[in-house]
Image (cartoon, coloured by chain):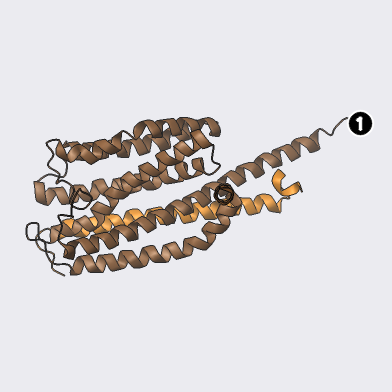
Amino acid sequence: MDLGPHAAYIWASFGAAALILLVLVVWLVLDGRQQQKMIAELEARGVRRRSDTSG
Amino acid sequence: MQQAQSLTQRLANPTRFMELSATLLPWLTVAAVVLTVIGLVMGFAAPVDYQQGHTAKIMYVHVPAAWLSMAGYSLIAISSFGLLVFRHPLADVSAKAAAPIGAAFTLLCLVTGSLWGKPMWGAFWVWDPRLTSVLILFFLYIGLIALRSAIEDEALAAKLTAILALTGIVILPVIKFSVDWNSLHQPASVMRIGAPKIHPSLLWPLLVMAVGLTIAFVALHMKGMRNEILRRRVRALRSAEVQMAAGAASPLPAE
């Protein structure tokens, strides 16, 4: 696709958008997995929140 | 009234939010990807701008990023208000989750703006009212993240961050009206009084991209809120573990 004399600026803009969105998605997915892993480890050790044990 | 109150109560419950968001998140993700891809295809197939040529295609990421940088800050301000005034249980979760996402979209706006500015204005950066006010918005986002992480007491951090967020909202009208203050930046073409000044053949791809990226923002924010709720559960479990250990170490004296 010929985007004219300023093609590098156009591709760099779309590349920056893809990179920033990808970093956000990867960070959020890894963070979520990390939190779920820690909850599973704590629960495996028999730890329960007060709200889970009462009633 | 009764119904409205029960809806608010339902949304205020983190467990209910986790259930609802688990259902919505896959649909939002698919909608965001599909609409963004359609918007990109429409944008690259759109006619070439008569003045700027293909370079005008940068608007398909720059303009939605700019809108979302301001929408993200508005979301933080509304959430902060919800925390300070209504003490809504999810308000601080929402404000905290929105800050890095809003900062990322503001960074994207600044980067794509620079890459658009160089071929059109001859410079990557000028200390223009619009550019400078968006840079201040980016620093505000960084300030909110830094302030929160600098205070160990979570409740205090939430309150102080909310106060800073509400104070910083003054930047939004400054950004909006800065194009009228001797700015190189072009005035609003879409969100203005009267009809949009942009041709429909270029406007439609922009609107589709804007809707796609807005749904992406909502999905990212929802995922961030889910992570934050899980983080708070981890903290509660650790605290319960410490209390269990302390209880086991010092049994209650016999009466």
Front residue of this view, candidates B69 and A47: B69
Q: Is B242 left or right of B88, judged from the image as shown?
A: right
Q: Which residue is mark 1?
A: B254
In this orientation, does residue B142 appear?
yes
Q: Colour of chain B?
A: brown
Q: Position of residue B123 (x, y in %)?
A: 12, 44
In this orientation, does residue A48 appear?
no
Please identify the residue farthest to the front as the structure is shown: B1
Q: Position of residue B101 (x, y in %)?
A: 39, 48
Residue at position x 25%, y 69% in the image: B41
Q: Position of residue B208 (x, y in %)?
A: 28, 63
Numbered label tally: 1
Location of residue B216 (image quadrant): bottom left
Crowd tier of the residue under label 1, counting other residues whose Cα lies within 10 Å: few below 14, some 14–19, many 20 or above: few
Residue at position x 30%, y 46% in the image: B107
Residue at position x 46%, y 46% in the image: B97
Please identify the residue farthest to the right as the structure is shown: B255
Location of residue B55 (image quadrant): bottom left
Q: Quadrant of the C terminus of chain B?
A: top right
Location of residue B53 (image quadrant): bottom left
Chain coloured orange in the rendered structure: A
